[in-house]
Amino acid sequence: MKVEASNCDYGGSMKSIEALDELTVKFTLCTPDPAFPFKIAGDSFAILDADYLNETGGDSNKISENPVGTGPYKLKEWKRGESITYEAFADYWGNKAKTPTAVLRWSKEAAQRLLELQSGNADGMSNVGPDDFETVEKDSSLKLIEVPAANIFYIGFNNTIPPFDDDRVRLAFAYAIDRQRIVDDYYPRGSVVATSFVPTSFAVGASPNVPWHEYNPEKARELLKEAGKENLEVTLTYRDVVRGYLPNPGIVAQEIQAQLKEVGVNVKIEVKESGAFLDSVTAGKEAFYLLGWGADYPDATNFLDYHFGPQNQQYGKPYDDIVALLREGASTADLAKRQAAYDKVNELLKKYVPMIPVAHGGSAIAFRADVEGAHANPVSALVFAEMKPPKDTFVFVQNAEPISLNCADESDGETFTACAQIFETLLRFKLGTAEVEPALAESYEANDGLTEWTFKLRPGVKFHNGATLDANDVVATMAAMWDAKNPNHKGRTGTFEYWTAYFGPFLNQ
Amino acid sequence: MQESASAPFAAAPARPAEQLRVQSPFVRTVRRLLRNRSAQVGLAIITLLVLIALFADVIAPYACDQQIRQSGLRRRSPPCIHLLGCDRDKPQLLMGLDSNFRDLFSRVVYGSRLSLQIGFLTTGAAILIGTLLGAAAGYAGGWADNAIMRIMDVLLAFPSLLLAIAIVSVLGPGLINTLLAVAIVSIPVYARVVRASVLSVKEMDYIAASHALGASPLRILFVRILPNSLTPLIVVGTLGIATAILDAAGLSFLGLGAQPPTPEWGLMLGEERNSVFNAPHLVFFPGIAIMITVLGFNLLGDGLRDALDPRRKA
């Protein structure tokens, strides 16, 4: 089986996906992509059985009813609004689940999740409240696992909406914000002040030698005076959603309001509904907003290309010189060359101030102390199969209910946690790290130009419906996302965010 | 229901000494009210609240959005009261600091202004509109009555907070829109009460007499009928203030009402809802403030009902 674009003019970066033999799949790309293994390890690219995919027509509703994957757990029951129950899959190819039953529950309030954990109703919880770190640590029956800060919290501007169309205003704001104070006062342990947009822990992308503007309210006042924008009135928008990069949205917004008041800017705060806010930001309609980004894979492209690429409208008009440098940085695997390009990008970001990078937020998850195999993953979902509480059921409480169990067409982290127990990808992230390791593929190799990636599949992998994994399953799964004319190209909304974010437009669109 | 204004007040006074003085119904009601235990407590609470709101500038040691930054002073610090042995080097914080380094006591004090304004304004507006609608419906009767009251029935069919949420979702969050939403959902209650009393007062002999004397319908409605239908409205209105404050606080709690950094009690509660266990003072004080205010108006409302009820003699 083979899916192929006749040429690369359709705008995407995928050229062809081909099953070479029963257990070999080859991806051919239009442009070199050093991050391909990381991308393909994302939960959106989990492999489905080709026959099962045809039966369901790729419909997220049908897949959520009866998900068939290769993972260590299969779905037992999804009680909507309440919980998801998994049971161990007896024919799993790897290490079998250590606990026969796993339960995923959710609660929006950090205090309530902690209460569940303390009372022993739950064995683990996500997103410990930033003020609860100490409580958890002092409690000997609990343990805290800090998650490395692979994210960025930034204050965004739109350079087409007044008064932010004036470069001096954006620069003045950059001088007016005391980032150190925000991180010291409102962020939990493990958080750092951002010097660049990309976290410093990444191989390339951050430029410690190009530090961000120092806090200087005097200079901010001067710049505003020079621009004739004294006694400015602006509206700051944000969504009241807790993420690792922004653990206290409302409180940080009020701090920024207070800081800007010191330089004579009056800020009105407006909270927006999460989905509507994101849509509005993406459409370039928010002038001054708080937002952040969590890493999907540890490479600069995941941060910089997504935000400052030619398609992105959220900062207003894209900057052509930055776009050109980003192309340069993504087209080679040579780290020194890439870093040189990204250093220039960071210089330009500092000059144009499309956003103010504030913090890389540390977060933590907590477990009962008697849970063996408790871990936290910096960029991927937790693996319930590795956890073993001293009873037969492992219960985890997270922020929110998953949206569906077909993660090909999802982009929400809480949903990925639910999918990742059932479905598997060709490569996966090693426990507790951001490195990839073989999963459904035993091995993989790339040509020198980084455009052809060949994956050797693991033999004898069984799906939950009894089918055996082969190369055609991989091609069928990918084709359903890639090809807009494919009968299985349905999903929940049909947007397949991660496919388009990583590989550009669909085929036959 | 028999109305107090039309009730004869020839009842024998308790003591013969008072027999000489003519007691106006107003004075009589006030006396009865002041003798009522729950009304006493309610009045005391509300008087205190009004004073706090009026003199908030004097009482509050800090401005409501002023950050108190001092070395060694952490955000969400618990209350520090010098009299109770708190270190005198530290600034006195009666209710502690909130998450943004602001004095919680000052914010709660300023919040009383907001809550009272919300209560009086929304209830005032709702009473005004509700009275006009109810009076028109009751006096005109026929299709006008039907049309107005069926609309009111529709509004009453929704739980009031749910309807308010729907209205705010359409208008957008904000304090003004919250006032509007709460006022709109309270209208039907007043319209019903006024219509009911207008219907009963309308049949009184003195109204017929007025008719016979050639008074215009508007004059009859506004001069003869409405003043005599006010009693139940006063009671329902007082209790309504409590409901309005509670509804507005609920909307702010959900993030639909007042926007930060407004010192609104419901908003303060909502912002700190995850601090219940690690900084309880942040939810305790705004919560208590809401409770006391609502209690005050409810007690006063109950007292008024007892005092104005002609069947109950003190």
Image (cartoon, rainbow, N blue to C red):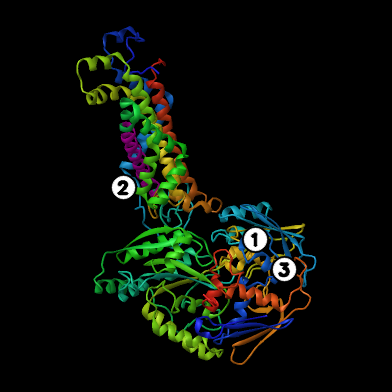
User: What number is the disc on residue A62?
Assistant: 1
| Magenta-drawn stretch contains A32 | no
| Magenta-drawn stretch contains B125 | yes
Tell me the amino acid under the disc marked 3.
Answer: Gly
**Which residue does the image show at 33% across and 40% down from the upper left?**
B121
On screen, residue A81 versus residue B122, left or right, reads right
Q: Does residue B293 sit above or below B87 in this rendering?
A: above
| Chain of residue at mark 3 | A
Which stretch appears magenta? B106-131
Task: Name the residue carrying label 2.
Answer: B57
What secondary structure is found at the residue carrying circle 1? Answer: helix
Q: Within 10 Å of the Cα at label 2, are there few (<14), some (14-19), or many (20+) other Cα atoms?
A: some
User: What number is the disc on residue A71?
Assistant: 3
Tell me the amino acid under the disc marked 2.
Answer: Asp
| Chain of residue at mark 2 | B
Q: CA distance from mark 3 to mark 2?
A: 64 Å
Q: Nearer the viewer, mark 3 or mark 2?
A: 3
Q: CA distance from mark 1 to mark 3?
A: 18 Å
Q: Nearer the viewer, residue B20 or A67?
A: A67
